[in-house]
């Protein structure tokens, strides 16, 4: 009898440990971000289909310009989806909202991350990373502060000379002091962070235009989340792209990016984060997709989204 009970317990444990299958979602904006959050889904990370007939899931309500550009969504340690976004081309804060199901969202919140810097020009493309070890959320973004880094003031020809900054929080109520995240002596935007084993991997854009065009995606790494990142790697993408977002599918990394001069999305893939293949001809996105974020969800989340849309709620 004892042996039978043990077998039954083992079978129960195996059944409980079976993971629900997952699917990939992509959050993005269209146009100038006037209508808000768009979502697409994919079974394989290559072919993406717009949800909600490519209509907005959430309209922007905060900021002077009321935009929702560069929406970044992650699943947090509290089992909620957390989103940050660019509210304007020229403001010193960012937008934030949360959701349990990606259809019903909390009240939108303006986070004044650079209000302590009166000369700061902007806060572009905020990104989220949840660090399980510390139970902290890191928010990072790009800001220009005129005259702060004079050696690269003319690197983009338009007065924009960015560096990456960050703050941390456990609850999106109280935030740590804003600090520098990445400055290696060049104009940098659009940093996003992943973690593999004990290494934090930062994908970033070299925003340099002058005297030689870069405008490409590179990688920096660190053993700590908020400092000691390496010099940037050689470019892993073509020039004239932005908004990297990365995911590892099986044993292959895919980094998607916005090919904004061609008005389409592109991607590169790698098995080792060193050798990269351009796969832009293999990815299909909804027409007009702009800078966004790829993330995994359980298939039940997508099923419930579809049910909600079909019910008109």
Image: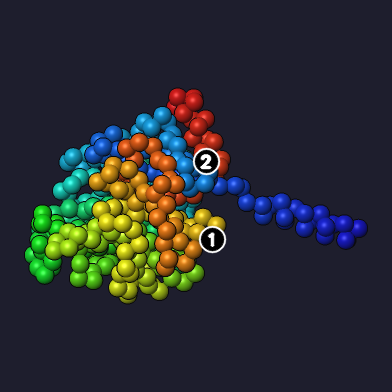
Whether 154 is drawn above or below 101: the answer is: below
Q: In the structure shown, which secondary structural element does the residue marked by tag 1 occupy? A: loop
Residue at 49% x, 69% y: name it: 197
Whether 117 is drawn above or below 82: the answer is: below
Which is nearer the N-term, disc 1 or disc 2?
Answer: 1
Q: Would you say residue 168 is visible in this rendering?
A: no
From the viewer's side, name the closer residue of 185 and 66: 185
Q: In the structure shown, which secondary structural element does the residue marked by tag 2 occupy? A: helix
Q: Residues within 10 Å of mark 1 (few under 14, many from 20)?
A: few
Residue at 23% x, 39% y: name it: 32
Q: Position of residue 300 (x, y in %)?
A: 56, 40
Q: Is residue 15 left or right of residue 222?
A: right
Circle 1 is placed at which residue position? 251
Circle 2 is placed at which residue position? 301
Residue at 10% x, 54% y: name it: 158
Q: Position of residue 287 (x, y in %)?
A: 35, 36
């Amino acid at each position: 009898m004892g042996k039978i009970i043990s077998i039954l317990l083992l079978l129960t444990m195996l059944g409980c440990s079976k993971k629900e299958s997952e699917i990939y979602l992509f959050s993005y904006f269209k146009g100038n971000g006037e209508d808000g959050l768009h979502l697409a889904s994919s079974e394989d990370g290559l072919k993406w289909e717009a949800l909600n007939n490519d209509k907005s899931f959430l309209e922007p309500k905060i900021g002077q310009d009321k935009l929702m550009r560069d929406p970044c969504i992650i699943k947090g340690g509290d089992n909620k989806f957390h989103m940050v976004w660019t509210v304007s081309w020229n403001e010193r804060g960012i937008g934030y909202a949360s959701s349990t199901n990606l259809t019903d969202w909390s009240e939108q919140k303006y986070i004044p991350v650079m209000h302590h810097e009166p000369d700061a020009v902007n806060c572009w493309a905020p990104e989220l990373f949840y660090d399980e070890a510390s139970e902290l959320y890191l928010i990072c973004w790009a800001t220009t502060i005129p005259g702060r880094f004079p050696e690269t003031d003319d690197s983009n020809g338009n007065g924009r000379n960015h560096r990456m900054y960050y703050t941390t929080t456990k609850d999106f109520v109280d935030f740590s002091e804003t600090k520098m995240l990445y400055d290696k002596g060049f104009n940098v935007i659009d940093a996003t962070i992943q973690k593999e084993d004990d290494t934090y991997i930062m994908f970033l854009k070299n925003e340099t235009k002058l005297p030689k065009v870069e405008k490409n995606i590179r990688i920096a790494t660190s053993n700590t989340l908020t400092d000691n990142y390496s010099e940037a790697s050689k470019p892993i993408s073509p020039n004239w792209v932005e908004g990297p977002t990365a995911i590892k599918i099986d044993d292959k990394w895919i980094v998607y990016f916005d090919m904004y001069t061609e008005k389409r999305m592109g991607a590169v893939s790698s098995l080792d984060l060193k050798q990269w293949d351009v796969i832009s001809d293999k990815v299909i996105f909804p027409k007009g997709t702009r800078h966004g974020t790829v993330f995994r969800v359980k298939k039940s989340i997508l099923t419930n989204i579809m049910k909600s849309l079909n019910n008109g709620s």
